[in-house]
Amino acid sequence: MTVLPIKLVGDRVLRTPAAPVTDFDAELRKLVDDLSETLADSQGAGLAAPQLGVSLRVFALAPQLSDGKVDHLVNPVLEFPDEEDQDGFEGCLSIPGIYLDTRRRMNVVAKGYTKRGDPLQLVGEGLLSRCIQHETDHLDGVLFIDRQRPGQRERLLTTIREAAWAQGVPMPEVRTSPH
């Protein structure tokens, strides 16, 4: 396992929809292990493969979010069992130091696979649901800034431009999430 650098907002890979995983091989298992190691090192809640520069539909979750039962999901497909929403602060390892109130669905059912190709269903509520949606957005080339109201978005883009880590980083375009 290796701790890898996390791509920052402005990197094209973060805006490119990721390809489905077709080979459940040693290379995929290593990617999942690298995602988990990098996530643990960064102390985040989730990390998607595009954030490591790999355009594949896989993400890692902090094990404590799912009581240690699930720490990754490959080729996730989301379903929403109800219309209940939640508001809460959200950040992103690709946009360091910025946290904004972001609306998400309260409940989600994520269907996908383990790194070995076994079918997996993950039911998320609250923070787990938020994390699953956030990471799946990454796989679709969508960032949490895309979920902000227009006024918030403009303030956020200004804050990003002024951040020390963003010097020389191209500013992100704003997109709409498909979820």
Image (cartoon, grey):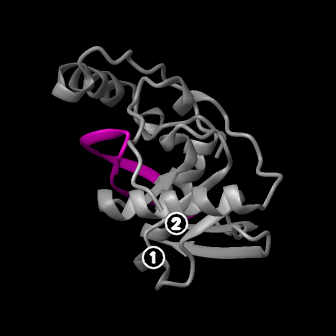
The part of the image, by quadrant, that contains residue 124 is bottom right
Amino acid on which the number 1 mark rests in the picture: Pro
Picture coordinates of residue 23 (x, y %)?
81, 55
In percent of width and height, residue 106 lies at 51, 66
Three-letter code for the amino acid on which mark 2 is drawn: Ser
Q: Nearer the viewer, residue 151 or 68?
A: 68
Q: Which residues are magenta?
A: 84-103
Whole-percent x, y for residue 160 in the image: 26, 26
Instruction: Describe residue 48's horizontal placement relative to residue 56 as left or right.
Output: left
Query: What is the secondary structure assignment of the residue under circle 1?
Result: helix
Seen in the picture, residue 16 relative to 136 is either above or below; the reply is above
Kindly indicate whether the residue at mark 2 contacts the one at mark 1 (C-beta within 8 angstroms). Answer: no
Mark 1 / mark 2, whichever is N-terminal: 1
Residue sitting at x 49%, y 66%: 61
Q: Is residue 45 visible?
A: no
Q: Image point 64% across, 46% down: which residue? A: 179
| Among the 4 quarters of the image, the one containing residue 122 | bottom right
Q: CA distance from mark 1 to mark 2?
A: 14 Å
Magenta span includes 6? no
Q: How would you classify the magenta stretch by its main secondary structure?
A: strand
SS assignment at label 2: helix
In the image, is residue 5 above or below residue 75? above
Of tags 1 and 2, the one toward the viewer is 1
Above or below, 6 against 68 in this view is: above
Residue ID for mark 2: 129
Tell me the crowding category of disc 2: few under 14, some 14 to 19, or many 20 or more residues within 10 angstroms, Cα based: many
Residue at x 65%, y 63% (from the top left corner): 29
In the picture of the structure, the residue carrying the numbered disc 1 is 63
Q: Is any part of residue 141 visible from this angle?
A: yes
Q: Residues within 10 Å of mark 1 (few under 14, many from 20)?
A: some
